[in-house]
Amino acid sequence: MTAPRVKTLRAWAAWTEDDYHSLVADLRNGLDLETAAANLGRTHTAVAKRLAYFIPPEENIPVDERERWVRDRLARPRWDWMTVVRDWQQHRREDLWSVADTQAATKAWATHTPLAELAQRLSTSETSTVRLLIQLGLAETRTDVINRLGATPGAALALREQMANDRTACAIWILTVDGALGTTSPHGLGFPRDVTIHGSQSDAEEERDRLLTWHDRARQAPGADPATPIVWSITERSLGDHTIGTSLHGQHPPRQKPPARLTRANHRPSRRRRKS
């Protein structure tokens, strides 16, 4: 019997040791995967994919046979499934936290324990400790953690934060608007293009809105083509960066969604038998 559908409260939460132990207990007790997923607050698809972490890479078990393979191995009391899980977590560069780890992190956050001391207590790096604090909902960003618990000067986390601050200080926002009436047409391009540089995203958006408003007014003039779409982009860049930074793109007027197709009723008319 499958469990009723429940809200997946932990659909995107990182897996912990307690999650794996709970899943193993449910599988050993003969519960179906849907019920085990509901007990974890996750989707059936997520739990089915997580079964791959119980299978050593050299086994190469097909997807449709993973559940049967894992249940068969769990029936063997001496099978060390946690070692296999830890190997996969390390290979995927994913942190595996125990209940004791999460409790220690929560307590350290409340008592303002230095980040370096907490990382040493958890036997991990300061960067991984920051990820744990964010996953627990204690902080929203890396900066919040550093401002509260500090970071070791010269270490990787402190250098990364300094680089991010330096990059933010020297970042610029590039606005490109193609096809807007009232802007110049570069030689050989064949259509108007306007490129401007701004010091913030809000300034770039304000200039974009001004150009689009002017375009809407200009296309009402006699002879103007009102059907030409305008393509715009706002990209954040700093010196030497190519793809690092926020990018916004759009079309004016916005692209219309195709109308929904009318579907016929899912039934067949009854056929009358001909009289012989």
Image: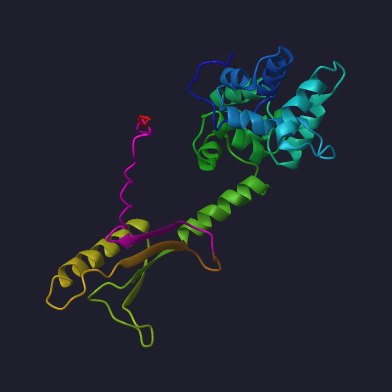
Residue sitting nearer the eye, 140 or 242: 242
In this rendering, position of residue 56 left or right of residue 218: right
Q: Residue furthest left?
A: 222
Q: Residue furthest front?
A: 276
Residue at (33% x, 46% y) in the render? 261
Q: Is residue 95 above or below residue 111?
A: below
In this rendering, position of residue 27 left or right of residue 248: right
Q: Confirm whether residue 58 shows in the render.
A: yes
Tell me the quarter of the picture where residue 215 sits.
Answer: bottom left
Q: Residue furthest right?
A: 78
Q: Where residue 95 appears, x then y in whole percent?
A: 68, 35
Q: Where residue 37 appears, x then y in whole percent?
A: 60, 22
Residue at (51% x, 29% y) in the render? 137
Q: Is residue 178 above or below residue 79?
A: below
Residue at (63% x, 28% y) in the render? 47
Q: Where residue 109 appears, x then y in whole percent?
A: 56, 27
Residue sitting nearer the eye, 73 or 168: 73
Q: Is residue 259 above or below residue 228?
A: above
Q: Where residue 199 appears, x then y in whole percent?
A: 37, 63
Q: Residue furthest bottom?
A: 187
Read off the magenta span. 243-270
